Amino acid sequence: MPCTPIEDLGTAMAQIQGLAAHAAGAELLPYRYDPGKLGPQEVEIAITHCGVCHSDLHLISNDWGISQYPFIPGHEVVGTVAAVGAEVRSHQVGQRVGLGWQSNSCGECEWCTRGMENLCLASEGTCVHRNGGYAERVRANARFVIPIPDALKSEFAAPLLCGGITVYNPLRTHGVNPSSRVGVIGIGGLGHLAIQFARTFGAQVTAFSTSAGKEEEARALGADHFVNSRESKQLKEVAGTQDLILSTINADQDWGVYLQALRPTGTLCFVGVPPSPVSVHAFPLIAGMRSISGNPTGSPYRLKEMLDVAARHGVKAQIEAFPMAKANEAIEKVKKNKVRYRAVLTN
């Protein structure tokens, strides 16, 4: 898919070519669409790389009941600015940029004016009710188009724009610092980034995994301790030791055990979505002033901050690259958990 820059500001190519699902769960097929006139506050990005996120798989299958077809997935986009709207002053044609889960917000509500655009009730997803990044190009409001630091290679930057910010934002929200003790459940696409960021903040990091074979890798990523969560003895030994436990997995667990692993005032924070409702006893929450929370993607400001931190401290996604034309192959490998740890499509 060639990506030739567009020099005329406020204009764009008549059609965009991508790979779309035409029904729930269908394989992706070539698809062209007319994006219409470029909006005055929009930026059009010529895509060089796009990460494959588990959210894309859910959207392709319409697991959340919000997908519209034909549908082009993709929301971990890196590329260059191809065109800018008439009112855009923050970006220039040819600039290397990234785009994550969110492509727009109202800009006027309480949350937007507080710099928490990710909580805006009128938030617009990059590939929700619009076509995303498995394509030649994609559009978004300029506020959500983030410059990529020179030190980050594009293929490694792409997974940070959703996977990275998903774990970085709660670490910042909960004030992780060198005195913190942070647990990370799951050493996968999110977990391997969470360990690196937590270590960058100077925290003591404990990795929890059902795969004993991942201990060496978890320690190489920066974990100080490793707990095989299939071993009840190991779980009991870490009771009352963690300030924050970040659950990155999409699987059911005995969440009461992880509450017991928290220190007083500690938090169990979900960024992965288990299939069943989370059920815990209230007493450990009351007795230790513990809490359960969740965390979505981050604001544009937090995205810029995260990319800067990753560039300066060498936080790096482990990736497997695929040509854009082999997106279906990448999706199948992600479905089967055969990618360590993030798949990235390249144009």
Image (cartoon, rainbow, N blue to C red):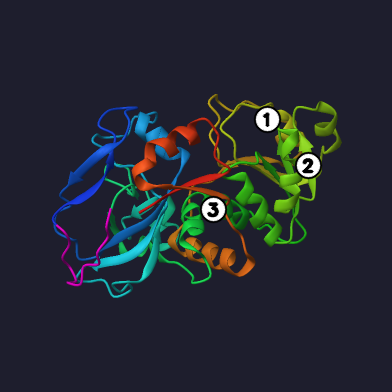
Q: Residue at x 62, y 45 (%)?
A: 191
User: Is the residue marked by circle 1 packed among few (<14), some (14-19), or many (20+) residues within 10 Å?
Assistant: some
Residue 164 is tagged as 3
Q: Between tags 3 and 1, which lies in front?
A: 3
Element marked by disc 3: helix
- Mark with earlier residue (3, 1): 3
Is residue 126 on the magenta stretch?
no
Q: Position of residue 306 (x, y in %)?
A: 54, 62
Residue hosting label 2? 226
Q: Residue at x 73, y 43 (%)?
A: 207
Q: Position of residue 232 (x, y in %)?
A: 81, 27
Against 92, residue 155 (above or below) is above
The disc placed on residue 255 is 1
* Cα distance between the residues tagged 3 and 2: 21 Å
- Callout 3: 10 Å neighbours few (<14), some, many (20+)? many
Under mark 1, the amino acid is: Trp
Total count of labels: 3
Residue 262 drawn at (x, y percent): 75, 41
Picture coordinates of residue 195, whole percent (x, y): 67, 51
- 41 on left or right of 334: left
Mark 3–mark 1 Cα distance, whole angstroms, equals 24 Å
Residue in the image at 63% along x and 47% along y: 192
Give me the disc on residue 221.
Answer: none
The alpha-carbon separation of the residues under discs 2 and 1 comes to 18 Å
Provide the residue span drawn in magenta. 1-13
Pair 2/1: label in front: 2
